């Protein structure tokens, strides 16, 4: 790729900006539909106000990332109650979480505005014979409008900001760029995503501000023009969302470099087969399998041990090929997901130490680590300490570390390098193992399951011969050293490649 | 020309009581008839129930017991908003709509009635309450207190009601403005043939403006007489105490003047 990385990153903005704007606008409109009647009701009944404002304030105390994540199991549960059909990932959970977020400022300003109205004006409205509706329309609404608009502006800015987090539940937004950029340390991508989200928030806030002042200064024309600009913006954003042909394939990826590279690798093959491809990247490893089952994504790469322990709840550890075969049979039977095959390399959890340190302490296996652990600090990725694998490892090896801290993968390697951690839960296909001269500890008791990279296809695409034919050549084709090298091209600090470029490099390397 | 009607309607209270929670009785079994076309003042100290009695006419307050009638019809027969559109209402805090111009404020009743040609009526009403036509386009916050209350009166009279209710209409105004506006309202009453009921705590104002003064105390009417009869001491103890204040003031001022 030539040209500035920032400009390259900016080419991803239009589609994501449109999706981001649509999501935020929908949440804001739904928030208005709910909170305006609620504000009117609350202003008339102090009891209702206490409950409504209390609930909205409580919602605000939940971190937005957690609020989004909470809607996944909730919708899954509801979908189960009504016999399926409610999407637990993507637009719906994002919309609901952001709507809840938008409630408080609108509600609070609405109630404050209505209860703060001069009682004499209300008495006059009654005195001249207004009906309740006329009083609302002719007197209360225009007088509350400026205060209410301030609340709507706050809600809009919050919603646009929080919408970046919808990436984690599989809804495309400008957050895609931020999360992908953070994982691959592509700062141009992070910057482009952040700047675009900030620019969108400022532009919407400014337009709403014009409407607010237009109302306050009785300059209707100005308010209408600003509202018109907003409407046109939403309509433009709506345009690409409408025609989504059957030939569009959505490739999913979890939130780390290898996944981004493999997603591009899959995407390139599908494009060559004539499909239009879009990517849903940065999905949490819990939600990604659910997204495949529901058809929100069509294809992605998972790891056998993850499905085995998390989805199938198994704790026995069979040989690698037997495990892959058993997973394929299980997914076929329980959800119709097709396991196309293993790619050829493994990305297992592997405990790694600084090479020199391991030699000095005489540690070569997990058995050796048991006695040294109380003097060592463990660094792990964000989910490892909660995973069943860690529980299984602790059953086999009674490891008690002096401290255990969770990092995002990039910072985990940094922590090991700088001595903040002595042992990390590395990944066996990680290019940094070789580059940082790390020693991978052996697992003599066989406590860590196999983690073959496996290609998974959504139930709705399982019988699509053209798609299967395009993907089949990937099976058994990628050896671990090639994957490690490709990963390192993305993860290294100097002369970083984009996942796109690393995927091209990998294709050439393995002859695809 | 204002649409003319012969004379304002009669208002009658028949055993009207207003009780609040906690055993407070604001109005206690009032029965009184107010003749059409008369100017009646309701006088009493704070908490005597005079405002409550007035607001039961246009149903800003609903009675606990008894019937209020305008003409022959009970006020409870119509919906509150339909009833209020036939009654002019002016109160101490005025309550002009701050987001509307003077003209829009005055014409609000016509707008509610679905009247399209409102401008000529606004012009008439500004003349009626002695405000310059240039005020039509102004916002209420650009007016003095007295000017605002004139707009309040114009708004109340816009739909040509036969009945005008005034709740301490001059309470927030300076004495000079008070006097001017009181005189103006009495003139409008006579000119338009209104039935006017005015609540005030100022006995002097009541004596000067009204044809008949009802004195209220503890929710009951304790005196019902013409101003002349009250000044002659025919109203009983509570009324005499109220009348004594302006009379004493007038006596002292005469002394000062020599």
Image: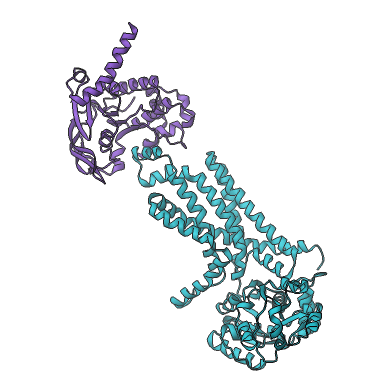
The spot of residue A311 in percent (x, y) is 57, 83
Quarter of the picture containing the C terminus of chain A is: bottom right
Can you tell which chain is drawn cyan? A
The relative height of residue A182 versus residue A482 in the rendered view (above or below) is above
One can see residue A7 in this view: yes
Quarter of the picture containing the N terminus of chain A is: bottom right
Which quadrant holds residue A313?
Answer: bottom right
The relative height of residue B196 versus residue A368 in the rendered view (above or below) is above
Q: Colour of chain B?
A: purple
The spot of residue A312 in percent (x, y) is 56, 86
Q: Nearer the viewer, residue B220 or B33?
A: B220
Q: Is residue A35 left or right of residue A241?
A: left
The relative height of residue A341 versus residue A250 in the rendered view (above or below) is below
Which residue: 28% across, 41% down? B61
Which residue: 23% across, 31% down? B216
The spot of residue A488 in percent (x, y) is 78, 76
The relative height of residue A497 versus residue B6 in the rendered view (above or below) is below
Q: Is residue A406 left or right of residue A126?
A: right
Residue extending furthest top?
B258
One can see residue A240 in this view: no
Q: Nearer the viewer, residue A50 or A151?
A: A50
């Amino acid at each position: 790729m030539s040209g500035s990385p920032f400009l390259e990153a900016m080419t991803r903005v239009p589609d994501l900006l449109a999706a981001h704007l649509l999501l935020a606008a929908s949440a804001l409109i739904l928030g208005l539909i709910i909170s305006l009647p609620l504000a009117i009701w609350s202003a008339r009944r102090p009891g209702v106000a206490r409950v409504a404002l209390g609930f909205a304030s409580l919602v605000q105390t939940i971190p937005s990332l957690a609020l989004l994540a909470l809607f996944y199991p909730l919708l899954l549960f509801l979908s189960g109650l009504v016999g399926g059909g409610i999407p637990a990932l993507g637009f719906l959970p994002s919309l609901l979480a952001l709507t809840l977020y938008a409630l408080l400022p609108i509600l609070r300003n609405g109630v404050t505005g209505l209860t703060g109205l001069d009682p004499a004006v209300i008495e006059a409205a009654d005195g001249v014979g207004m009906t309740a509706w006329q009083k609302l329309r002719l007197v209360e609404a225009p007088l509350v409008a400026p205060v209410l608009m301030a609340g709507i502006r706050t809600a809009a800015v919050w919603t646009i900001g929080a919408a970046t987090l919808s990436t984690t539940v599989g809804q495309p937004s400008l957050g895609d760029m931020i999360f992908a950029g953070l994982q691959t340390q592509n700062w141009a991508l992070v910057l482009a995503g952040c700047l675009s989200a900030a620019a969108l928030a400022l532009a919407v806030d400014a337009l709403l501000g014009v409407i607010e002042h237009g109302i306050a200064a009785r300059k209707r024309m100005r308010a209408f023009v600003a509202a018109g600009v907003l409407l046109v913006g939403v309509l433009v954003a709506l345009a690409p969302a409408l025609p989504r042909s059957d030939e569009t394939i959505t490739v999913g990826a979890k939130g780390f470099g290898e996944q981004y590279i493999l997603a591009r690798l899959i995407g390139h093959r599908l494009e060559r087969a004539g499909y239009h491809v879009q990517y849903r990247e940065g999905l949490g490893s819990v939600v990604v399998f659910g997204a495949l089952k529901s058809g929100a994504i069509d294809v992605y790469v998972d790891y056998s041990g993850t499905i085995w322990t998390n989805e199938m709840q198994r704790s026995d550890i069979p040989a690698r090929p037997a495990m892959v075969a058993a997973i394929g049979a299980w997914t076929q039977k329980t959800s119709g997901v097709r396991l196309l095959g293993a790619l050829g390399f493994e990305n297992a959890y592997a405990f790694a130490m600084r090479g020199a340190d391991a030699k000095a302490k005489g540690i070569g296996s997990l058995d050796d680590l048991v006695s040294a652990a109380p003097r060592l600090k463990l660094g792990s990725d964000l989910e490892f300490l909660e995973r069943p694998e860690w529980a299984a490892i602790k059953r086999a090896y009674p490891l008690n570390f002096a401290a255990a801290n969770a990092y995002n993968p990039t910072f985990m390697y940094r922590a090991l390098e700088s001595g903040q951690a002595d042992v990390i839960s590395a990944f066996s296909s990680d290019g940094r193992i070789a580059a940082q001269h790390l020693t991978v500890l052996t697992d003599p008791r066989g406590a860590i399951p196999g983690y073959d990279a496996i290609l998974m296809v959504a139930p709705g695409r399982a019988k699509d011969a053209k798609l299967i034919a395009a993907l089949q050549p990937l099976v058994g084709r990628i050896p671990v050293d090639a994957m490690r090298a490709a990963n390192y091209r993305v993860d290294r600090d100097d002369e970083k490649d984009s996942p796109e470029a690393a995927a091209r490099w990998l294709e050439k390397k393995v002859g695809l | 020309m204002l649409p003319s009607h012969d004379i304002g309607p009669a208002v009658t209270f028949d055993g009207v009581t207003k009780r609040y929670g906690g055993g407070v009785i604001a109005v206690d079994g009032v029965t009184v008839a107010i003749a059409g076309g008369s100017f009646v003042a309701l006088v009493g100290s704070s908490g005597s129930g005079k405002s409550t009695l007035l607001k039961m006419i246009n149903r800003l307050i609903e009675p606990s017991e008894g019937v209020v009638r305008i003409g022959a019809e009970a006020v409870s027969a119509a919906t509150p908003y339909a009833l209020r559109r036939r009654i002019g209402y002016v109160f101490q805090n005025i309550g002009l709509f701050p987001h509307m111009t003077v003209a829009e404020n005055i014409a609000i009743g016509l707008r509610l009635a679905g009247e399209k040609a409102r401008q000529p009526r606004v012009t008439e009403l500004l003349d009626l309450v002695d405000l310059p036509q240039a005020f039509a386009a102004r916002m209420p916050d650009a007016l003095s207190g007295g000017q605002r209350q004139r707009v309040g009166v114009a708004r109340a009279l816009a739909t040509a009601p036969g009945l005008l209710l005034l709740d301490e209409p001059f309470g927030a105004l300076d004495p000079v403005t008070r006097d001017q506006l009181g005189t103006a309202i009495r003139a409008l009453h006579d000119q338009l043939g209104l039935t006017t009921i005015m609540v005030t705590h100022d006995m002097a104002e009541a004596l000067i403006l009204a044809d008949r003064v009802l004195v209220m105390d503890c929710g009951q009417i304790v005196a019902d007489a013409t101003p002349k009869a009250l000044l002659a001491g025919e109203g009983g103890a509570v009324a005499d105490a109220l009348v004594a204040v302006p009379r004493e003031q007038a006596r002292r001022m005469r002394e000062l003047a020599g």
